[in-house]
Image (cartoon, rainbow, N blue to C red):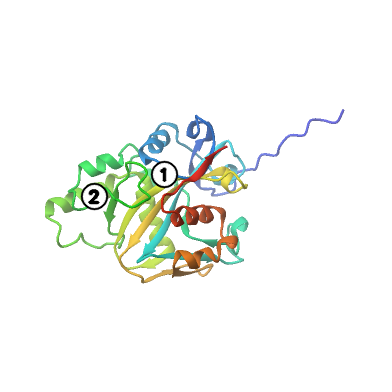
């Protein structure tokens, strides 16, 4: 009898970053679902707070018993969406030459040093004036989400029409908010050049077990509404342009799977874009 073949476990790479992960069974206690599911972020933030772990990225890329937590940012301005294309030399070989609607990345251990996961969107709402935190009425509002007005311009002061008290509230929010929004601010500035203001609209949680990339990731999808169309990609490894959803659909077959699911969600008047497996 030949010896039993054992799966080779990758060795952690030198200077490997520690990324936020959660065991799959904690995230899907009632069974796996597939697609973009409009849910209350608070539920999943609570799971992450209680069950979060940090492990080397090189190991987690090959371990589907864990899900890597990935904020996934979609930029919109005046009904046009920022579509990017990865070049053939992009670092993630599984996504080379693919089109993407989202800016995504891992949450690292250092991202949590000055934030906490227990602050819910409802708590944020209670701390702010209704003029700046409002219950949105878009057809994507399938759960008790809130749109939160943030300025993502580095070192910019708060809007002039805010009172000193309101400004202090927002400073506390930016210093203490959950890491999903903290990460969004950092990653947005790292990936693109943009000089306007943004509103964040949480769309839902994205799970895609149809491919090896998706099996080890879970997306927190955030729609960023911008008041300016002056946006460009910083990296030479990507290109980007603002186009309509109809134009985006022409590139659907060459999109990464997450962007295909997001596109289908945005195109439907009343989105139902997930199924139980």
Instruction: Identify the residue at horizontal 33%, vertical 54% (top origin).
Output: 200
Q: Earlier in the sequence, mark 2 or mark 1?
A: 1
Image coordinates for residue 42, horizontal then vertical, percent: 35, 38
Quadrant of the drawing holding the C terminus: top right
Question: Is 242 or 239 nearer to us in this picture?
Answer: 242
Q: How many numbered tags mark residues here?
A: 2
Determine the residue positioned at 71% across, 37% down.
7
User: Is 91 on the left-hand or right-hand side of 6?
Assistant: left
| Numbered disc 2: secondary structure | strand
Quarter of the image for residue 186 reads: bottom left
Residue beneath disc 2? 133
Name the front one of labels 2 and 1: 1
Q: Give the percent coordinates (x, y) of residue 196.
A: 30, 66
**Pointer 1 residue:** 38
Q: Quadrant of the N terminus?
A: top right
Query: Toward which corner of the image does residue 74 lie, by quadrant?
Result: bottom left
Q: Is the residue marked by circle 2 packed among few (<14), some (14-19), or many (20+) residues within 10 Å?
A: some
């Amino acid at each position: 009898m030949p010896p039993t073949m054992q799966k080779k476990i990758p060795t952690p790479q030198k200077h490997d970053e520690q990324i936020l992960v959660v065991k799959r069974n904690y995230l899907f206690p009632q069974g796996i679902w597939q697609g973009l599911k409009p849910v209350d972020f608070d539920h999943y933030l609570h799971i992450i707070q209680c069950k979060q772990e940090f492990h080397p990225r090189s190991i987690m890329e090959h371990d589907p018993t864990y899900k890597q937590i990935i904020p996934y940012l979609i930029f919109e301005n005046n009904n046009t969406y920022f579509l990017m294309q990865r070049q053939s030399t992009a670092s993630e070989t599984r996504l080379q030459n693919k089109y993407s609607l989202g800016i995504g990345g891992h949450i690292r251990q250092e991202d949590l040093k000055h934030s906490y996961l227990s602050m819910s969107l409802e708590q944020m709402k209670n701390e702010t004036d209704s003029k700046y935190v409002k219950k949105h009425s878009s057809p994507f509002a399938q759960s008790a989400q809130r749109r939160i007005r943030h300025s993502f311009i580095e070192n910019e002061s708060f809007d002039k029409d805010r009172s000193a008290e309101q400004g202090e509230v927002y400073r506390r929010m930016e210093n203490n908010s959950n890491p999903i929004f903290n990460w969004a601010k950092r990653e947005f500035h790292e990936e693109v050049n943009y000089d306007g203001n943004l509103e964040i609209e949480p769309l839902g949680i994205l799970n895609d077990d149809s491919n090896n990339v998706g099996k080890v990731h879970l997306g927190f999808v955030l729609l960023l509404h911008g008041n300016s169309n002056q946006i460009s990609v910083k990296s030479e490894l990507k290109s980007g342009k603002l186009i309509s959803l109809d134009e985006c659909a022409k590139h659907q077959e060459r999109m990464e799977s997450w962007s295909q699911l997001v596109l289908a969600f945005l195109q439907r008047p009343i989105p139902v874009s997930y199924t139980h497996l």
